[in-house]
Image (cartoon, grey):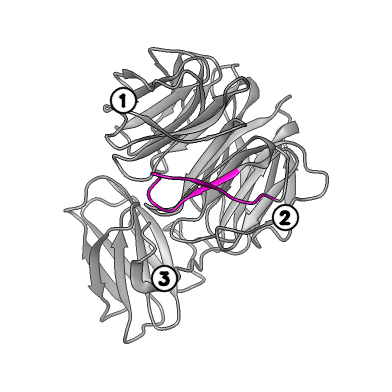
Amino acid sequence: MNTKIFGIFLVLFLSGNIASNAQWNQQTSNVTDNLMDVYFTDNNTGFVTAQGMPYLLKTVDGGSSWNKINLPSDGCNALWFMNSNVGYVVGANLPVLMKTTDGGLTWTMTDTGTGVAAYDICFSTPDIGFIVGGASFSGGQIIRTTDAGATWSVVFTTTWEMLSVSFSTGNTGYAVGMVGVIAKTTDAGATWTQLTSITNKNLASVFFIPNTTVGYAAGEGVILKTMDGQNWINITPPNAGILFSVYFTDVNTGYAAGQYGSIYSTSDGGSTWTLTQYNINGLFQGVFFSDASHGWAVGDHGSIYKYSGGVGLNETGQNNSDGFMVYPNPATDRITAEIRDLNQKSKLIIMDFTGRVLITHQIKANLSEIDISNLTSGCYFVNYVNERSIVVRRIIKI
């Protein structure tokens, strides 16, 4: 999101410690192929890619059941969905982008014109998106679209393949790749600069907390962290194997998944890690959270595991330790913001993923009802702002 928001640094005071009932439980995928990537648009609707296969898995009940969706091409690697209808899939075998606007019922194909494999995809706005990839014979690259995937152009090249991309704001994004390459943009992806890296190990995944300069990168036995979006430190847990995916639900709580069925979790920003291993006879390739208490990890041999738990969660599925709740979530027309300790100069600001301020609401009571009926379906951030702090909640408008 736009770093000009509020003119101050946006700090997330969300969950801090994993509750004792937090756990991962295996779901039934009904496939045995290796699963590569996972994306949920809300707590119920999600999609999974299968390595080299011409299909997606889709669920509309949080993973209790999964169904195949046929794709027009195989070799799938990564996917990104704007909402439950609009989504994109890219693959390793062909430089082809597949797009759906009806939740996977039909697909259109676009040749990105790169001629190399695609390993990850990310959109910073509904129109501006990025694909990272490469090949050993031609190096790595980042390509960009400004028309929702209709056309693409190369905006960054390097000697080694690029493997993952993440945006913290509409303007600021990061990409990582082989031999520790880290690239950054501050102009909505029009240009990229390679940062100084503290590792030469392959980095397979990068994730930045929305609206902050706090980010994490994971890869070949390494986890890196940055607090300022520029300088990195090593926070790798002891004896870590290869990690293929990293995801944080806030600045402190995160997960890294990879080799030997391993899922590492932290509740203190990576200072300490807890390792849990699952008998999947392989590795986890992707991890994704729709909110702090709903997550999924996918991997080899059709493995799908769902996370259920959280930090001091009440019936609304939110952490109430900071005295700020937003419900219902998902919501349709209206939301209620509940604030325990009201400050006279408090306000609520609702923004979209690009950082646009859509609604500003002055708070006059501990319970505030806000009309969101004019918002389109998708993900939004509700910011509770007072003299001392900013607290963020992510909501889904359906």
Labelled pair 1, 3 in contact (Cβ < 8 Å)? no
Q: How many marks?
A: 3
Overall secondary structure of the magenta section: loop
Extent of the magenta region: 182-197
Q: Nearer the viewer, mark 1 or mark 2?
A: 2
* Left or right: 61 as drawn, with respect to 347: right
* Left or right: 255 as drawn, with respect to 114: right
N-terminal of the pair, mark 1 or mark 2, is 1
* Amino acid identity at mark 2: Ile
Name the spot of residue 319 as percent of width and height, x first.
49, 63
Question: Residue, x 56% and y 60% (percent of image)?
Answer: 251
Pointer 3 local density, CA inside 10 Å: few below 14, some 14–19, many at least 20: many
Pointer 1 local density, CA inside 10 Å: few below 14, some 14–19, many at least 20: some
Q: Residue furthest left?
A: 374
Disc 1 marks which residue?
100
> Rounded to the nearest whole Å, what is the CA distance between mark 3 and mark 2?
30 Å
Labelled pair 1, 2 in contact (Cβ < 8 Å)? no
Disc 2 marks which residue?
235
Name the spot of residue 86 as percent of width and height, x first.
30, 32
> Rounded to the nearest whole Å, what is the CA distance between mark 1 and mark 2?
38 Å
Question: Residue, x 75% and y 41% (percent of image)?
Answer: 221
N-terminal of the pair, mark 3 or mark 2, is 2
Name the spot of residue 301 as percent of width and height, x first.
64, 20
Tell me if residue 54 comes above or below residue 358 in the rendering: above
* Amino acid identity at mark 1: Thr
Residue 83 shows up from this direction: yes
Disc 3 marks which residue?
324
User: Based on the displayed image, in which of its 4 quarters is residue 85 positioned?
Assistant: top left
